[in-house]
Amino acid sequence: MCSKMIDFVAKMIMIVINIITLVISLGLICGMIYAMVGLNINEIVEVFGETDITTMMYAMYGFLGALLIVSLVGLLGVFYKSKLLLGIYSVFLMACLLGVAIVATLWFLEGDSIMENARVQMKDSITYEYRGDFKTDVFSIAWNLIQYQLKTCGVDNYTDYVASEWYNGTYNSNSFNGYDLPFPISCCEGGDNYISLSKVIDGELSADMFNETWVLNCMGITDYGNGTITTDGPTHPNNKGSLDEVKTLLKSSIYVVAAFAAAVVVLQLVLIWASCHLIDSKQFTGEDEDD
């Protein structure tokens, strides 16, 4: 009687958790595809260059796809009472536990190095790839979107633009209504009050969307209206760097991530127990207990 009850509990654990995992994995995959295609989130990823951050993001697709398939394998193993499928399922879960441990260790040991690599890639993208507030290339849209969304300027601060091709006039886009700009308009405080992020993503920005007085005040430019213009006034860019803000966001969510990771590990251990128990259960697989 007790063995039947344990079999039932193990079976229900397998069914319920794998159905939930299946639904969540499918939802996350659909959400990521929508973000990549519908919101052009891949443009933001391009800013980080070929770093471990982008590698981890693309690896997430592979992990979720594998999780989707393995959840199906676990369910099929239960429904068809297949030792082979349950065995494959158990092996994958054990591999996942090892993978979580490796990723956690690498992030703990190499987290600062990953961020510094990202800093170099991001500064290079500003120096050589950024073209302006109203340009529609990948890097320009990405940086404008980051700066509007996070209320930041550059990687560390607005001076990151001083040595850029944009600042030096290579793309003829470092101006607004005839005034030369020391940094992009997307760096200005309160920029999100003038434009919507959807227009940034779609590359639909134009100079007439912005209040000229606000832009000139942000840039420290004073036009006296008699042909005299001064550019030595106080500037008002966002005072936070984009990379530091990303690090702050990661730190603020570290406890949530840790709790989620701990929950995943516990669930994996429970599922490993359930699948291994069902593999060993002669009653579940229909084998004669007297053999």
Image (cartoon, grey):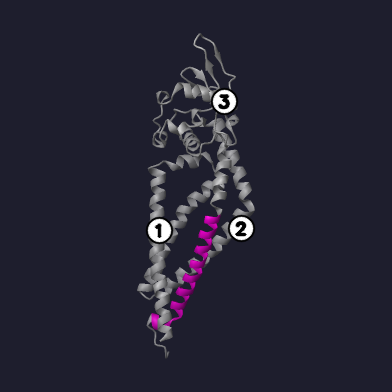
Q: Identify the image quadrant of residue 220.
A: top right
Of the residues under marks 2 and 3, which one precedes in the sequence? 2
Vertical relation: 163 (above or below) 105: above
Magenta segment:
255-284
Residue assigned mark 1: 24
Q: Residue furthest top?
A: 226
Amino acid type at mark 1: Ile
Which of pointers 3 and 1 indicates the residue nearer the eye?
3
Q: Which residue is mark 2?
A: 105
Q: Is residue 210 above or below residue 54?
A: above
Distance (Cα) linking label 3 and label 1: 46 Å
Quarter that holds the C terminus: bottom left
Q: Earlier in the sequence, mark 3 or mark 1?
A: 1
Residue type at mark 2 is Thr
Residue furthest bottom as drawn: 290
> Residue 103 in the image: x percent, y percent?
57, 57
Instruction: Answer whether labels 2 and 3 touch (C-beta < 8 Å).
Output: no
**Mark 3 in CB contact with mark 1 (< 8 angstroms):** no
Who's the residue at 63% across and 51% down the image?
110
Q: What's under tag 3, amino acid-wise?
A: Thr
> What is the x, y in percent for residue 89?
45, 69
The residue at which mark 3 appears reads as: 235
Q: Position of residue 7 (x, y in %)?
A: 41, 79
Q: Is residue 103 left or right of residue 280?
A: right
Tell me the chief SS of the magenta region.
helix
Judged from the image, the secondary structure of the residue bearing numbered disc 1 is: helix
Dot 3, crowdedness within 10 Å: few (<14), some or many (≥20)? some
Q: Alpha carbon of mark 2 to alpha carbon of mark 3: how far?
A: 43 Å
Mark 1 vs mark 2: in front = 1
Q: Quadrant of the N terminus?
A: bottom left
Quick one: SS at disc 2? helix
